[in-house]
Amino acid sequence: MAVRFDAEGEGYTCAFNLGSQSRFTVCCWVKAYTFNSAYVTPVWHVGSTTPDYLSLNLGVVGAYVLWQSNVLAYAPYTREEWRYFGVSKNGGSGTVVSRPATASDYVVSTWSSGPLTVPFSTFRIGQGAYRGEWLDGAIAAVKIWVGTALSQTELEAEGEQVDPVRTSGLTAFYRFDGPSTTDDSGNGWTLSGGVGATQEPGPFGVTVDLADAGLAAETLTVSTLLPLAEVGAGVDLLASTRLIGLTDTGHGDTLPTAAATVPLADAATAGEMVLLGQPVMLTESAAAADALGVSALAGLTEAGAAADALASSALVGLTEAGVGADGMLGGLLLHKVLGDTAGADDVLQAAMVPEIGYIGRPRVRWAAGRPRI
């Protein structure tokens, strides 16, 4: 996540007042939505309100490190891209490494004729020292080392994660998961300002620890290996296909996104849906309605206690004594003893020859009528 500035006066400041420094390092991620054409668009600024300061700025020419009115070094930047910048000052020399969030290679630029020292007094984030200088954009993971100049290799390593890789000599760290004045290094360099700032997604994916036993709703933005160890305590949503062992006893909602083998071992206590053609043992005694989606041989041994529907042809023994209605749906030759005493309706739907015993009254001849004239 990141902190978002969209108006002047929403930036942060911290009065370090650490005196003149010949070595220091500042690393951060930044995204600018517009460039301030009338003034500079500052990412960070350190020094006094007099010309004795050092700052990182953005513009149509890209990114540049500015000392007073002198550009010490340039770096690439495209509007609305998340880009990492690591700036290290070592005496009169300095190094800038940068890369966009969409690439892995770093671009390196240097300077060799800068100021020997800079007063590390007030440090500004998202704003400059003068009116009209502010960032319309977002910033994340600001790391500051005062008295330490990180090497190029160390600067590149800091661009690979949010938290500081090098903690030795770390002065302050502002994670900026959103608007915050907290120094996450624990050194107590609390920020001022940030009124009106908001939150937006940052350059990094989100790491979520699902150790709360289903007590919270978590959203995963990247593929992950997620053990589902709770016993139906929560709803777990997997964003990628994986193999899931369904070991709970019907107490939770478990949604697998891949095919899974589920043993149907209960005795008609739950509704199971079989997505693949597989045999299902129907061992209950008319306690549930069993639907077979494939051809099957079913033995109907109950005594008229349940309605059994077969989706395919089956051999059915009609052994009840007038307890139910027996129907033949095809043209079958059936030999059946109708021994019940008006206890059932037995219907044969095969071709039969009826006996015709009455042909009705004879037809009467009618007179032809008078001839036409």
Image: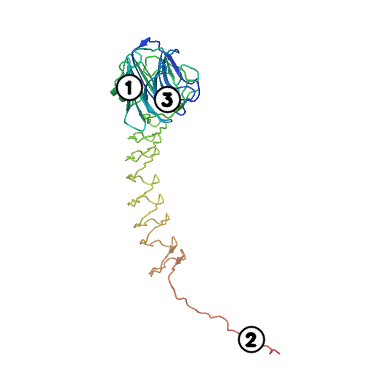
Where's residue 197, x and y in %? 48, 23
User: What residue is shown with label 1?
Assistant: 110
Q: How busy is the neighbourhood of tag 3: few (under 14 within 10 Å), some, or many (20 plus)?
A: many
Secondary structure found at label 2 = loop
Q: Give the residue furthest to the top.
A: 19
Residue 60: quadrant of the picture: top left
Q: Kindly identify the amino acid type of the residue bearing the numbered disc 3.
A: Leu
**Looking at the image, is mark 3 or mark 2 earlier in the sequence?**
3
Q: Which is more N-terminal, label 1 or label 3?
A: 3
Instruction: Compare residues 282 and 136 and report the one nearer the observer.
Output: 136
Disc 3 versus disc 1: nearer the observer: 1
Q: Position of residue 186 (x, y in %)?
A: 37, 16
Nearer to us of marks 1 and 2 is 1
Q: Kindly tell me whether residue 53 is visible in this rendering.
A: yes
* Colour scheme in use: rainbow
| Mark 3 vs mark 2: in front | 3
Please rate how many residues cluster around mark 2, counting C-alpha atoms within 10 Å: few if below 14, some from 14 to 19, many from 20: few
Verify CB contact (< 8 Å) between mark 3 and mark 1.
no
Q: For the residue marked with disc 2, what is the amino acid?
A: Trp
Where, quadrant-wise, is the C terminus in this rendering? bottom right
Q: Earlier in the sequence, mark 1 or mark 2?
A: 1
Look at the numbered disc 1 and give the secondary structure of its residue: strand
Nearer to us in this view, 40 or 10 = 40
Q: Which mark is residue 366?
A: 2
Three-letter amino acid code of the residue under disc 1: Thr
Q: CA distance from mark 3 to mark 1?
A: 17 Å
> How many neighbours does mark 1 have within 10 angstroms: few (below 14), some (14-19), or many (20 or more)?
some
For the residues labelled 1 and 2, the Cα–Cα distance comes to 127 Å
Asked if the residues shown at circle 1 and circle 2 are in contact, with their CB atoms under 8 angstroms apart, the answer is: no
Query: The N terminus appears in which quarter of the rendering?
Result: top left
Q: Residue at x 36, y 55 (%)?
A: 294
Total residue callouts = 3
